[in-house]
Image (cartoon, rainbow, N blue to C red):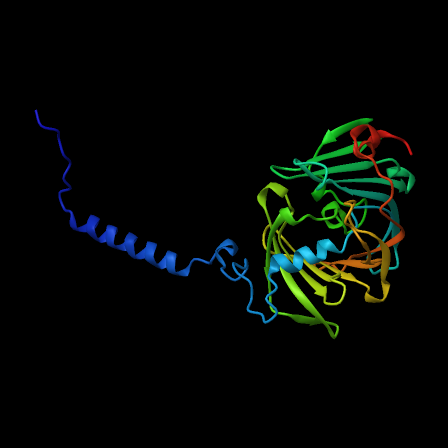
Amino acid sequence: MSPTRWHPRNPAPFRRLAALLAVAVLLLGAGAPTHPAAQSDFFPTADAPNTDKLSGDDLYQRVLDNRFDAYDQDLQVVSGDGTGRFSTVELRLQYLSFREKSKRVISKTIAKYFAPPDVRHLGYLVINKQNGPDDQFVYRPSSRKVRRVNVRSEAVAGTDFSFEDVVPPEFEDGHHYRMADAEVDGLPVYVVTVIPHAETESQYSKVRISIEKEHFVPIRTLYWDNKQVLIKQLDAQVESLEGFEGEVSESESAEPKTIWIARRARMTRKKNGHFSTLDIQRFAANPELRERDFSQRELTASR
């Protein structure tokens, strides 16, 4: 017995319906807005033409070369909303490179608050690894427990900075593309766009850095969120640039070098104009930091 097939008595209306549906699909496709992810100009794919033969990777590496293998600093962040109201937080941040000590770990950063009282002893630890996601931990005194979290997206208490903005970046965190040179307030700058790798768990889809050409210090940084919206701008105060003498590396061939940092910078939110000013109040180059200074146990120490 052959299968029964249904045949409409009058197929013409169905043919007209099919034709109308086909036209509707074409019209919807033609008029549909392009998703931001499909915008080819948002994510660069190659370096801009240049005459000095420096790539985005080259320029970004020079920014990172302007850094000690270890440092210890006290930060004060003052936030305001434009109405005359301000709040202040203070924290200590320590950084140690492990590039010459480990095949698995690139660097470790620990940050602990010491003011105001309601966040005192709150601490964060970031272990930047060669492969895979970083190890990130938070210690909250209220719970007396260390928990694994995405530290990078955590706000520096009550400010417009996140820890991703203050934790020292590493070369392996993203792709680097050179853009056309520009000027910031009349100062010639290199421009590099950083596209974070997925495993960094960045809160940003793109970061654009303007780098002053003499010392390779970033003086303006723009941040786009994962919806590809420009949300923040960081401006370093050029007058606050200061050089520190010391050996950049612990290797025997290392020679003393002057490293330049901006001691004052201002982060501004594009949406509401809220701002936070960061001051490096104390900076120690190449202090005697040990591996155990970057442990979960140290994170819980009340000092």
**Horizontal side, residue 66 vs residue 133: left or right:** right
The image quadrant where one finds the N terminus is top left
Q: Position of residue 215 (x, y in %)?
A: 76, 63
**Horizontal side, residue 230 vs residue 45: left or right:** right
- Depth check, front residue: 173 or 265: 173
**Horizontal side, residue 86 vs residue 163: left or right:** right
- Depth check, front residue: 32 or 214: 214
The residue lying at 66 percent from left, 57 percent from top is 60
Q: Is residue 2 above or below residue 172?
A: above
Q: Quadrant of residue 228?
A: bottom right
Report whether residue 136 is seen.
yes
The residue lying at 85 percent from left, 67 percent from top is 239
The residue lying at 69 percent from left, 36 percent from top is 102
- Depth check, front residue: 260 or 117: 260
The image shows a total of numbered marks equal to 0
Q: Position of residue 92 (x, y in %)?
A: 86, 43
Q: From this viewpoint, which residue is outermost toward the top?
A: 1
Q: Quadrant of residue 152?
A: top right
Q: From this viewpoint, which residue is outermost toward the left?
A: 1
Q: Position of residue 28 (x, y in %)?
A: 38, 56
Q: Position of residue 232 (x, y in %)?
A: 70, 57
Q: Is residue 22 above or below residue 91?
A: below
Report whether residue 142 is seen.
no
